[in-house]
Amino acid sequence: MKWYQTSKPAVLLIPALLFLLLIVYSLVMAFAESIRSPEGWTWAYYGELFMQRRLIESLGYSLSITFVSVFLSVLIGWAVVRWFYSFIDEPGGKWLVWIPMLFPHFVWGYFVLLLLGQSGLISSFFYQAGWLSSREAFPVLTQDAYGVGIIITYLWKEIPFVILMLLPAYLQLPKQYGEVIAVLGGGRKEWFKTVEWPWVQPVIVEITLILTAFIFTAYEVPALLGISYPQMTAVLAYDWFYGAAWEERSYAFGLLCLIAFILGAIALLSFALMNRRRWLLSKSSHQY
Amino acid sequence: MKKWIFYGSAFLLFFIPAILLIVKSFTPVWRWGEPFTFDWTLRGWETFLMDARIFDAMAISLVIALVVTFLNLFTGIPAGKALSHSEFRGKSALEVLLVLPLFLPAMAAAVGLHITMIRLGLANNWLGVAIVHLVPTIPYTIKVMKSGYDRLNPDMLQQGKMLGAGGWHVFRTIELPMLMPSIRSAVFLTVTISMSQYVLTAIIGGGNVITLPIIYYPFLQSVDDTVMAAFSVAFAILPVLAVLFVELVATVLTGRFSISKRGAL
């Protein structure tokens, strides 16, 4: 008896399909720009792209910052949810975790600058307390060569995100299996292996993919807390996009397309591998 | 003990920073190495609210955020319903495709749309900016609305129809009230994400669409931490205002606004 569902899904999906069309169109256009030269179509820019020292350095810098930020946010956020999920679900707990979500990334970046910069509040406080001889004695934590400030900002913003994404999965853990495992003589290790991990794995993979794509290609935070060389990929792409030379514009398009292609392939592959557990993902999809 | 650790660290790491920004917005500039002074002042907020440029930017940011929110709900609510309450071929593939934009660089979409936007006259225009803000928001709204519909039993909607209600009536009186928590989350996320866009706005707006982030960015290097703190706090207040606005619209739509009508039901 499904007559009431004949309000056809196709009609309901029209706006969403138009949105998909917009995305596909934008990527195709970006790709077309990356292979268009004044003399016609060419792949040359992709070849030249990898001879740019700026890009090579940028990739290493971006990858390491992305890896550290994503790994630590997921790990810490996951640990917090595992240990504290019953308190986070309380109105007060949820409210606290939501606070950093309210602020844009660059505002939080400004806050990190205000707090941890060499002329920041902590440095000033230490000086007044007599623990610091001068401004320069305070460690360089922002606009530093290793991207420490960028990583701190991302951790501060993304750990709450990880917590809020993982929370529904943990609240809905099928606890009744715990008894089955106990009866069969299993311990906490079996519980983790057979119930908890299969249950939360799709969500963890999804969060990891979202954060990797976001941090690797976001402009706002590294533009504020990074240094002028090396730059993170988005900052470089932005510079190139507004560059005076034709090649630079093409490099910007090429670089963004290449990243989109690689990240898209990784995402699709991960989803294909998880396909058998898809129903789990949809079950635990995120209620904020 | 566990509870104490959680609340203690969440308070310190999440609540104190927000309080610190609020306090900073009401205190004079703190110069490095000089004692922190608490001579309360409204100067930060006055500068922020009196500057005509900032005021215009706030208005245009809110207009963009509300248009983006409307388009998000217009797309996300029906899509969430279709993905949750019906079965069709290729559904799981479509679900993956609809979240895929979250795994791609939004900037690639923005630069790809740029030339088309110029041709259509949407570049340097707030509507073009609103369209590009859909890229990082719609996937979230679809996800949130789908899980909202997952928790809503289709039989309830059927019951409304059997009692003779039309589709719009069912939506207004059953779906909307029951979906309110999801709609609230979706609105919150959408407005916050829209308010967080610097680079997408800069590319499509081309320096002509001056939203709050576009003004905030050059300000970041300024030493006037009082004004900067007020500016920062405003970013967190605007999503709250937007949610209240949507809440009001929903109240009017569901007809709970007028008590007489409720009595009649």
Image: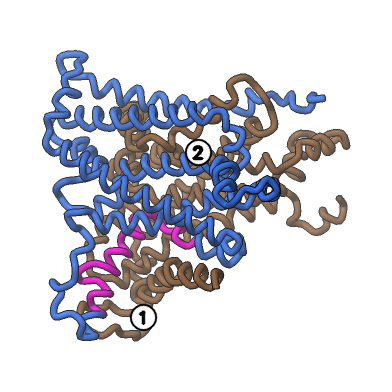
Q: Which residues are magenta?
A: A99-125
Between A173 and A288, the one nearer to me in the picture: A173
Between A62 and A40, the one nearer to me in the picture: A62
The magenta stretch spans residue A277: no
- The shade of chain B is brown
Q: Is residue B182 above or below residue B238?
A: above
Q: Which mark is residue B41?
A: 1
Q: Position of residue A58 (x, y in %)?
A: 19, 41
Q: CA distance from mark 2 to mark 1?
A: 41 Å
- The shade of chain A is blue
Residue B181 visible? The answer is: yes
Q: Position of residue B226 (x, y in %)?
A: 31, 73
Residue marked by disc 2:
B138
Q: Chain of mark 1?
A: B
Q: Position of residue B129 (x, y in %)?
A: 39, 40
Q: Which mark is residue A273?
A: none
Q: Is residue A232 above or below residue A79?
A: above
- Quick one: label 2, few (<14), some, or many (20+) residues within 10 Å? many
Side (left or right) of B105 relative to B93: left
Q: Kindly give the residue lying farthest to the front in the view shown.
A: A185
Q: Chain of mark 2?
A: B
Between B73 and A77, the one nearer to me in the picture: A77
Mark 2 or 1, closer to the camera = 2
Dividing the picture into quadrants, the one containing residue A56 is top left
Quadrant position of the N terminus of chain B in the picture: bottom right
